[in-house]
Amino acid sequence: MTARAWSLFALMSVLWGIPYLMIKVAVEGISPSGVVFARCALGAALLLPFALRQGGLARVLRTHWRPMAAFACTEIIVPWWTLTDAERRLSSSTAGLLIAAVPILGVALARLFGERERLGARRLTGLGLGLAGVAVLTAPHLTVADARSLAEVLVTIVGYAVAPLIVARHLKPVPTLQLIAPCLTLAAVVYAPAALLDRPATAPGAAVWASLAGLGVICTAVAFVGFLELIREAGPTRAVVFTYVNPAVAVAAGVAFLDEPLTAGVLAAFALILLGSVLATATAGRRRGSTVAASGPLGSGGAPAVAASGTPPVTAPAAPRSPRSEDVDRHGG
């Protein structure tokens, strides 16, 4: 890869791992609905003008509104809320590591969506190792108090795994900006009433506002443009490899900024999930954003779900060959 591609790769590795930290901070002062609304509203406000500038958005909506609505529900509307609510009780590092199991579930769910790719011994071994890592990570949380949080993270993982399969099957012709911007707009509209009703009685602190701004601007809007630039520079297959680094960043951020414990169980779970993800997705060579999921997110906590970029201003990706929606990964959180 070029020096520019490596720079983008390194930047994305960091910025797609920090949404879990930002969510953890934001949810201390704002309701989960408020966090999701702010993130989606900021992202939509920045991306929608460029989606409109590309032209043809109305035609895209008329033609693909059903799968786009399904994608919005499985990628943003449901999983962003469940992940945010879960982080009121789970540590950000635990959430980040659990979401790393998305590609493993994506491999399994792909077969339900018509994928007939053979699961060889390597991929089956990867599935087993990844599930073992999830078991190691969740074992300390198998209590009544944590049951809801674990269930919410499971819902998030399923959503992140299903969403790219919808894209691969029904939304390949849709340019990425014209997919993401309307979905963020829809999510913002859905959560606006709840965000208003659940607004805090007192003004949140500066750290909460900074986290909301970071989630909406960096991890959802600017991030997305940066990911498109990485796709152009390195190609869609290489561009998503950095997502294997995100769980380590999520753990490191939680330990460094929130004093979350770095235990032997966390390290073992990270090693098992990382190795399992690499093996389980090795044949396909793809993660979420094609037929195998990844963080996201669009991310990613990441979604993300949506990818992350760095300091360059948001500019419309107006190249003649606009990256298509099958090139997108979420992630994150």
Image (spheres, rainbow, N blue to C red):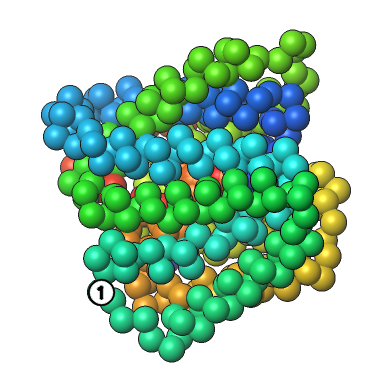
Residue furthest toward the front?
A: 144
Judge whether 167 appears above or below 52 on screen: below
Residue 41 x, y percent position in the rendering: 47, 22
**Which corner quadrant holds the N terminus?**
bottom left
Q: Is residue 289 visible?
A: yes
Residue 127 x, y percent position in the rendering: 50, 76
Q: Is residue 29 left or right of residue 78?
A: right
Q: Is residue 164 left or right of residue 322?
A: right
Q: Is residue 326 left or right of residue 1?
A: left
Residue 23 x, y percent position in the rendering: 66, 37
**Which corner quadrant holds the C terminus?**
top right
Q: How many marks?
A: 1
Please name the residue shown 56% across and 53% down the image. 154
Front position in the image: 16 or 262: 262
Badge 1 is on which residue? 116
Please name the residue shown 28% across and 29% down the image. 51
* Residue 199 falls in image quadrant: top right
Q: Is residue 300 visible?
A: no
User: How would you rate the neighbour count of disc 1 (Cα within 10 Å): few for under 14, some for 14-19, many for 20 or more?
Assistant: few
Front position in the image: 161 or 151: 151
Please name the residue shown 60% across and 13% down the image. 197
Please name the residue shown 75% across and 42% down the image. 89
Could you tell me the amino acid type at mark 1? Arg
Residue 115 x, y percent position in the rendering: 27, 69
Q: Is residue 36 left or right of residue 206?
A: left
